Image (cartoon, rainbow, N blue to C red):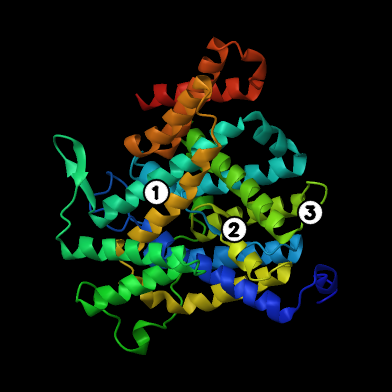
Amino acid sequence: MKNYFRFEELGTNYRQEFMAGMTTFLAMAYILFVNPSTLALVGIEELPEGVTRIDQGAVFTATAIAAAIGTLIMGLFAKYPIALAPGMGLNAFFSYTVVLGFGIPWETALAGVLASGLIFIVLTLTGLREKVINAIPGNLKMAVGAGIGVYIAFIGFQNSGIIVGDDATLVTLGNLTSPTVLLAVFGIVISVVLLSLNIKGGIFYGMIITAVAGMLTGLIEPPSGIGGIVGEVPSVAPTFGQAFIHFGDIFTIEMLVVILTFLFVDFFDTAGTLVAVANQAGLMKDNKLPRAGRALISDSAATVAGAVIGTSTTTSYIESTAGVGAGGRTGFASVVTAGFFILALFFSPLLSVVTAEVTAPALIIVGVMMAASLKNIDWDQFEIAVPAFLTVVTMPLAYSIATGIAMGFIFYPITMILKGRIKEINPVMYVLFVIFILYFIFLS
């Protein structure tokens, strides 16, 4: 085992790797409760006609299993201390844009996730992935990440009641004297304090403290006895295999845009995370990522597995840097993290105390972290600023990640051509321009 993971060469040991794996798990454990809540549209009372609500317990199990499978493959096959789980942003797109906005059944949405994972594998094996990534300008990549962050934060504010609808101004400040709203505000403050103190797993601990505060104040019904904390693993029967059954429903223009969005966001989430974690761990060689192909295959295989079991796109987590900071250098740390996700399967009863007020702070804090990429955009260049700004601002205003991406990708070639920078536009961008024009025509 030591030789396989090259402990001596990388200057690590079992204890160091175990602590790193546990640290990574704690830093990202919030996804176990946020993902089921997001995909089940907790807090949303009315669903589009013909759309049913996905089973929350099944998603909890699917989340844990997909995270365990993806992280285990990454650890054993790619040998990186990188953990995977259903991605924030992509789960919001799945629920609030695809299901709630487009009125597409969650079963068909899962089929779209499966299709994006299979395409991801093909692109990785053929080497086309890098060409597609390179075709899209870095400024737009940064804008997409930041826009998703703002969108996620907006959902958190809305779900908690901090921001509410208004006939005159569309949105306005909610009732801050409402006990449930105050609970969400308390959760935000606690999470900010924990993260400001550099406490690893601050988002997860913030959720725990908020849930406990809710139970102590009578705002959340506490679980009864040990059975309310530890219980049987929820069945994945309601979601398992639905992606296969409904695969034939994805061949529409609308689903093409959905699949492209799943693919696009996962592309850059994965690439950014791999580079960031490898840099921090000192694993980069000549500015290149060793075993990059294996890492990408691990990520795409996890997406396929997650879709089949019943969850949105599974991707590499930037929270893995917490484990690297604790000393993780090898894939054994990922094996440990995967083990904790399996153990977590037995704590599904805790879902009952994870209300919208408990998850809202996590959504808002993750949004803050994702919005950090705004600093990397060349705002002083108008031809760049216009598509970047439209990408960021349209996502929350149109309540759609896909619409934000479409706006940016349509305006980018227009502004670049008008500025005389036509030679800098990759031909792939013209193809995407046409696709997104068709997207808006279809929506109308």
The percent position of residue 83, horizontal first and vertical second, equals: 61, 63
Q: Is residue 227 above or below residue 209?
A: below
- The residue beneath circle 3 is 291
For mark 1, give the secondary structure.
helix
Q: Amino acid at mark 2?
A: Ala
Query: Which badge, 2 or 1, comes first in the chain's sequence?
Result: 1
Q: On the rendered structure, is 194 left or right of 337?
A: left
C-alpha distance separating marks 2 and 1: 25 Å
Q: On the rendered structure, is 127 left or right of 415?
A: right
Query: Which quadrant of the structure image shows residue 179?
Result: bottom left
Q: On the rendered structure, is 51 left or right of 421?
A: left
In this view, the mark in front (2 or 1): 1
Mark 1 packing: few (<14 Cα in 10 Å), some, or many (20+)? many
Q: Amino acid at mark 3?
A: Arg
Query: Which badge, 3 or 2, comes first in the chain's sequence?
Result: 3
Q: Could one spot residue 259 in this view of the protein?
A: no
In this view, the mark in front (3 or 2): 3
- The residue beneath circle 1 is 152
Q: Could one spot residue 377 in this view of the protein?
A: yes
The quadrant of the rendering that contains the C terminus is: top left
Mark 3 packing: few (<14 Cα in 10 Å), some, or many (20+)? few
Q: Is residue 305 above or below residue 350?
A: above
C-alpha distance separating marks 3 and 1: 32 Å
